[in-house]
Amino acid sequence: MEGWEKNLLALLLNNIKIKKKMFLIYLLAVVIPIVLTNLVIIHSIRENENIQKNKSMEITIERLKYHLNESLNEITEVSNYISRDLNINEFLQKKYKDNVDYYSDYISLVQGNIINNFYVSQALESIEIYTTNPTIINGGVFWDLRAVENTNWYKIYKENNQNMILYPYYEENKQFPPKLESNRTISFIRELPNGSNGYQSIVKININYYRLLANIKNEDISNNIVIAYNDQVIFSNHGSEKKNTIFRKLESNEKSRFNLSDSFLAINDRWDIYISNNQTNIFDLIENKKTVLLVLIIFNFLFPTLVILLINKSFQDRIALTEQHLLKVEKGIFERININQGKDEIGDLIRSYNFMVIKIDELLGEVYKKEREQQKIELAKTKAELNALQSQVNPHFLYNTLDSIRMRNLLNGDRESATVINELAQLFRRMTKWSDSYFVTVEEELAYVQRYLNIQKYRFVDRLNFSIYVEEECKTYYIPKMLILTFVENACIHGIEKKKNGGEISIIVSTQKDAIYMEILDSGVGMDAKRLMEIREVLEKKDLTTSNWEESTGILNAYLRLKMHYQEEGELEIESQNYTGTEVYIKLPII
């Protein structure tokens, strides 16, 4: 636990009276644990019951899938037999001369008991074979395909573009074949191979809907089962499933009430199975044990209450007396507590109090003395820092001497030296002018930098080139004085000077949104990764003691000034590579 969390907890508890604390102990250590334990037990019983229910529902789903797939497999086998049967194919492709010719072959086909053999499957209700052969007469099993082209089931079959489909539908007025037992129908439709005369034929096997429904209704009545296709309720073991009503839609909110769901492949389409059960009422489970439970609850509450009252009595008087003496201490009255202290923690507290009364004056004196010494240290530190800053910004006394030297060089004809001395004198004059100002404009800062680079150019001759680019609108923005100069000076001394062939310094000042961006780039000797990491550590810790490198001083000084005024809005980044150069990026808010 973090320190502030401990302090907050102590603050809250210390403001509560002992009696209330004892009540909290009773509430938190007795009442709530008992209630939570009972709830956990009840929840566990309920969860176990639900787990058993879920297992039962999973078994039911698997059993339903098995029976449904078994029925569909039987229907598929019947359709396979019809598709392969040469007698039926020959019967469908033959052109009959007249009705007598047709009925003669039809009777031969029926007497061969070919069609009737298919009805051994309990899942099958009827078989209908439709053909485009115009010489076949409607009746029995065989029907004219053209007469059903406008029926819904045939349109669905043609739209699916599949060899076989399983399609549940409701047909208000059945005509082909004559009306069966129910308007609800589940049909397996399959195309038969074309024969010698090219007549198109299909077989439509109607599944015994109510036999399947009866099997589903025979499942455990505590489970609510729904089998759906395309969000239409095809089967359900609860509710009204009348044979002459359309399939109702399964709403989204109804789906959410089911505990489990699964799907299975019925021919070429997926059908969904939903199942739920009524959750066990826990109060029904414990009804028979209510007397025993009531006795246990009373004992669990009464016994801890008596124990806590006795314990509270054992230390209440001593705590009250200690509180009285502490109130006297607040008034400056220090008296020892004369009472049978006891050997428990409260006795230790009283003994500690008595010892505290003796030593309190001495401790207070020592604390006061240490505070005074600490204040002196802080004041001395602040004064030293102010003196250090003052010594850095007070060079103007040299200006007059430099001006005299410049005039003498002009008289002697040394104009180049005179120009450099003039630039140096202007630098000192600017420093004198800036002594009372913390901020300068970008234009003033860059003018100062320009003079500094001119002087360095005199030193390095052709070994130093520099360029300065500043957006026009940036010139009037204010920045801390000598901010750019610090990094330019660092680039000259530690970058360009150490490189045999010299290098180039580029200064770019631009603006974007509400910030001003300054870039100081040099092609000097750069630094290795270790050195760069050391400088970043100095900036992060704001402590020069971690570095032995002299150039860190100016960088840290600039960084501290940046953070002192802009806090987190001011950003400084340094990138460098050995023998390549160093790049400094500064971002400041516009002021």
Image (spheres, rainbow, N blue to C red):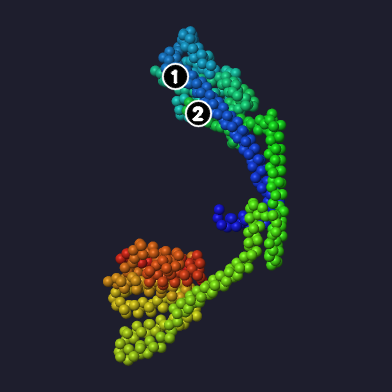
92 relative to 16 in the view: left or right:
left
Q: Position of residue 145 (x, y in %)?
A: 50, 21
The amino acid type, in three-letter code, at marker 2 is Phe
Sort mark 1 into few (<14), some (14-19) or many (20+) by Cα contacts within 10 Å. Answer: few
In the picture provided, is 134 more to the left or to the right than 363? left
Most foreground residue, 335 or 149: 335
Residue beneath the point at 62% across and 25% down = 221
Please give the count of numbered marks on the rendered protein.
2
- The three-letter code of the residue at mark 1 reads Asn
| Residue 221 visible from this viewpoint | yes
Q: Residue at x 60, y 31 (%)?
A: 49
Q: Which mark is residue 264?
A: 2
Number of residues whose C-alpha sits closer than 10 Å to that of mark 2, classed few (under 14), some (14–19) or many (20 or more): some
Q: Between residues 227 and 370, which one lies in front from this camera angle? A: 370
Work out whether residue 422 or residue 338 is closer to the camera in this orientation and state it: 338
- Residue visible at 70% across and 38% down in the picture: 299
Where does the image place residue 219, in percent across and percent down from the top left? 59, 23
Give the label, 1 or 2, closer to the camera.
2
Image height of 373 relative to 133, above or below? below
User: Which element is circle 1 on?
Assistant: helix
Residue 153 vertical position relative to residue 47 in the rendered view, above or below: above
Percent x, y of residue 163: 45, 25
Give x and y (percent) for residue 287: 69, 30
**Left/right of residue 162 with respect to residue 457 in the rendered view:** right
Residue 174 badge = none
- Residue 517, visible in the rendered structure: no
Q: Nearer the viewer, residue 549 or 203?
A: 549
